[in-house]
Amino acid sequence: MVLVAVHHDRARVTPALRADRLATGPEHQVLPAADRRWRVILQLPVVAAAATALAAAAVPLVTHGPAALLADLQDGGASPGPLAAVLLVASLLVGLPHGAVDLLRPETVDPAATPRARRRATVRYLGTAAAAVLAWLLAPLPVLLGLLALSVLHFGTADDVTARWLGRSRPAPPAAARVLALGGIPVALPLGLHGGAVAELLDALTGGDVDVVRDAARLAVPVVLAAAAVVVVDALAHRHGPAALEPVALLALFAVATPLLAFAVYFGLWHSWRQVARMVAADAHREGTTAAAALRALVRAAALPTALTVAVAVVAVVATRGDADAGLALLTVALVGVLCLTVPHALVVARTDKHLVVGQPAGGSPRAARP
């Protein structure tokens, strides 16, 4: 479960930050136009997804032949062997910070706010997550379906912002197609294609109504694939090869790899990677500093909550090792925590997206990123 750090450094309110706040308001996030460096950084997740899918398929294919690969795909997905552990750890270390610093962000809480205002923001954030947990305890199936739908929206809109940051915003395809394709694949495909591999977990999350979730996911898969096809065709028509590769790489990842591995790689090395890049770019612009300096500041801010979360996870895993029931209970609690923390996190990101501004290169005027 992601731990949320609550700390602010008033000394970081620099003249550049004050000027930015006066110009756009503390809730705004200003992104510089994506240059070649940022374009490469934002496309690295596509490489990670494709490479994971290839590795997951190659290991059973090389070691036991095509029949073994087909059997793995039918049984719940393939795994790249020991490499899976490396990918899981890397995804965890990249994925945790992006949500752990929500209450450190000037878009969430003004750095010049009073301690009382910060406490209120903290209570609202954690209270929203706690309310989601309570709702899940009272009605696990409908709340889980709602949380999954929220995840689709959150993941998809994050990639839509990336598309606009890269200058791909056009009347077609509709933003809804991008959101549904890029947000729906990580949610619908693993549950619709490999739901049997996580049946026990879904059973615990739904209170015994696992078939409802799997059937809903199966019904959503054709819709998500149709949206992905729209995105790919449009990207090819406009000669945007990287944009066409994004849904293809995600499809390969979630169709081939096991659900746990696929989602971990997506969450850490795709969704969180791009969100961290966005925060670094915005911070560098706000503080009038380099991206490297902004990254170091973000790492320092996220270090303590990330270390605490990793420590708790390690202790919990060690304590439940060898006990399948305890391990399932631990995974259930962790996923409920992550899903419920997604509620306030998604609200924070949506609020930022509402005021997002993409700037022009030096000397240019900013433009609203919303189409």
Image (cartoon, rainbow, N blue to C red):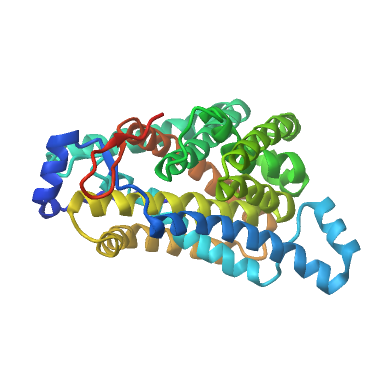
Q: Which residue is drawn at 26% across and 38% down?
A: 366
| Percent position of residue 341, x then y | 44, 40
Q: How many marks?
A: 0
Residue shown at 66% from the left, 48% from the top = 248
Name the image quarter holding the C terminus.
top left
User: In terms of depth relative to the viewer, which is nearer, 249 or 7?
Assistant: 249
Q: Residue furthest right?
A: 67
Residue lying furthest left = 15
* Residue 343 falls in image quadrant: top left
Residue 3 visible in the current orientation: no
Image position of 37 (left or right of 137): left
* Residue in the image at 21% along x and 49% along y: 286
Residue 261 position in % (x across, y down): 64, 57
* Residue at x 33%, y 50% (from the top left corner): 279
Residue 94 located left or right of residue 124: right
Q: Residue 235, percent across and down?
A: 59, 40
- Camera-nearest residue between 344 and 139: 344
Instruction: Say which of 232 and 293 sits in front.
Output: 232
Q: Position of residue 30 (x, y in %)?
A: 27, 42
Where on the picture, by quarter, is residue 307? Answer: bottom left
Residue 65 can be seen in this image: yes
Q: Nearer the viewer, residue 134 or 186?
A: 186
Vertical arrangement, residue 88 with respect to residue 116, above or below = below
